[in-house]
Amino acid sequence: MFKNLEELVKIIRDRRKKPQEKSYTNKLLNDNKFSLDKIKEEIGELIEAVEKDTNKVHEAADVIYHLLVYLEANNIKIEDVLQELEKRKK
């Protein structure tokens, strides 16, 4: 299950190292404002989906994807985030 998440992170990092023309991921990586706006939009869509009980999984996937790209674009490694969460366990 988490292998898919690891593969997604790898793809995002590969796009950052080796940009591909017309890549949506590259557009997000290269335009911080666009990326941030997309996160806000996707979170709004997730909230709406939860409230209406429709497309929740689809919208949650969009939020996770856009957040991972935003983190990577801003040199925040998901591994560091997960390590921080581990520290917070009680």
Image (spheres, rainbow, N blue to C red):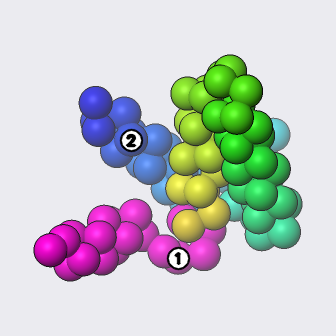
State the residue in front, 25 or 3.
3
State the residue in front, 66 or 10.
66
| C-alpha gap between disc 2 and disc 1 | 18 Å
Looking at the rendered structure, the secondary structure element under dot 2 is helix
**Visible residue check, residue 25:** no
Looking at the rendered structure, the secondary structure element under dot 1 is loop
Q: Position of residue 37 (x, y in %)?
A: 83, 60
Magenta stretch, residue numbers: 72-90
Query: Of the numbered discs in the image, which one, if any, rests on residue 83?
Result: none
Numbered-mark total: 2
Q: Amino acid at mark 1?
A: Asn
Query: Of the numbered discs in the image, which one, if any, rests on residue 75?
Result: 1
Q: Position of residue 32 (x, y in %)?
A: 77, 69
Query: Which residue, as the protein is rendered here, is positioned at the far top?
Result: 54
| Magenta segment includes 84 | yes
State the residue in front, 86 or 52.
52
Q: Position of residue 31 (x, y in %)?
A: 81, 65
| Mark 1: few/some/many CA within 10 Å (<14, 14-19, 20+) | few
Could you tell me which residue is drawn at 24 percent across and 77 percent down?
88
Between marks 2 and 1 in the image, the one whose residue lies nearer the viewer: 2
Query: Of the numbered discs in the image, which one, if any, rests on residue 5?
Result: 2
User: Residues at badges 2 and 1 in contact (C-beta under 8 Å)?
Assistant: no
**Rendered image quadrant of residue 46:** top right
| In the image, residue 15 above or below residue 57 | below
| In the image, residue 3 above or below residue 26 | above
Could you tell me which residue is drawn at 65 percent across and 24 percent down?
53
